[in-house]
Amino acid sequence: MFGFVHLYNGQEAVSTGFIKLLKKEDYVVSTYRDHVHALSKGVPAREVMSELFGKATGCCRGQGGSMHMFSKEYNLLGGFAFIGEGIPVATGAAFSSKYRREVLKEPGADEVTLAFFGDGTCNNGQFYECLNMAALWKLPIVFVVENNLWAIGMSHLRATSDPQIWKKGPAFGMPGVHVDGMDVLKVREVAKEAIERARRGEGPTLVECETYRFRGHSLADPDELRDPAEKAHYAGRDPITAFKKYLFDNKLASEQELKAIDKKIDELLDDAIEFADESPLPPRSQLLENVFADPKGFGIGPDGKYRCEDPKFTQGTAHV
Ligand SMILES: Cc1ncc(C[n+]2csc(CCOP(=O)(O)OP(=O)(O)O)c2C)c(N)n1
Ligand SMILES: [Mg+2]
């Protein structure tokens, strides 16, 4: 993948450690590094790959692209390119669960919402506004900060008054936890406690996961600003390699078993790529669907033709 695709390599333990504990009905809100969150939540690889290819078979029918994965079926509420934008959406989802449970008396409404975002985003106002509301109303939400130490080319240490993000939780009256975000079992332990707490109705938690991105900010970034020694240090802590070692050391899996899993993954990927490659592009008539409540009257209709006969819509003036 080339261009504005923001890879997640190095951060996998965060998505896996948290999302694999969820029920299908629980909500996940992510950023532009959303491909892995989508896969962890259960969105089929074919749909994720097709969305990356901009094809009609993608989870957003090709209209979202890499930064806007969304799935109603799996309660994945995005995929947001604007940083911080997903945090209020997640807070709203958590509010709706609480409202349905406590006001509308829907017994099954015990969903938990996870909001994933980066260290740089913690300097945005929406983060603080939402911590306040979530603590005030004891919302069933976990704020998961993926602190990879960088916001594009800005070092976290140079950009924030207090780099210990977890401390901002107690300032709003909620627990704040720091965890090694490159150790999937440690992440899972912290995640379990925070998710259960939210489900019990005891309110939100802020979790800071210390991690690192192995690639540039996006694949359009030549990644020349970070110190090679820093990159090498974190490469040595690769969460996947570390977990593999844990499995061997504790005799939980054999080399052969892991090779079989690798083979399965390769097959799954090949299938997803082939599927995406062969899928059709979205038709032109889809352009304004899901953008406005009623796309009629904008002059874009069935492919290649104007749907609306009214001259005011066909003379090049937008009447919105
Ligand atoms: C509201 C807004 N302002 C600025 C940008 C440009 N921008 C894109 S990514 C980014 C840095 C985000 O860093 P961080 O939150 O640490 O996430 P990471 O990329 O490290 O996962 C910025 C400033 C944006 N996308 N949205
Ligand atoms: Mg960052």
Image: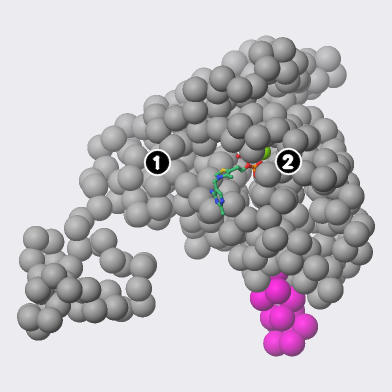
Q: CA distance from mark 2 to mark 1?
A: 31 Å
Residue range highlighted in magenta: 94-107
- Residue 202 is a magenta residue: no
Locate residue 213 relative to residue 129 in the image: left or right: left
Q: Please report the residue visible at 36 percent of the width from the left and 67 percent of the height from the top.
A: 290
Write down the residue under mark 1. 52
2 or 1: tag closer to the N-terminus: 1
Q: How many marks?
A: 2
- Residue 247: image x %, image y %? 77, 21
- Residue 37: image x %, image y %? 59, 45
Label 1 crowd bin: few (<14), some (14–19), many (20+), radius 10 Å: many
Q: Quadrant of the N terminus?
A: top left
Say if disc 2 is inside 8 Å of ligand 1. no
Write down the residue under mark 2. 159
**Which of 198 and 231 lies nearest the eye of the viewer?**
231
Q: Tell me whether circle 2 and circle 1 mark residues in contact (CB < 8 Å).
A: no
**Which of 107 and 305 lies nearest the eye of the viewer?**
305
Amino acid at dot 2 = Ala
Query: Which element type, helix, strand or loop, lies under badge 1?
Result: helix
Quadrant location of residue 240?
top right
Amino acid at dot 1 = Leu
Locate residue 266 relative to residue 28 in the image: left or right: left
- Residue 104 is a magenta residue: yes
- Residue 167: image x %, image y %? 89, 50
Q: Please report the residue visible at 30 percent of the width from the left and 51 percent of the height from the top.
A: 56
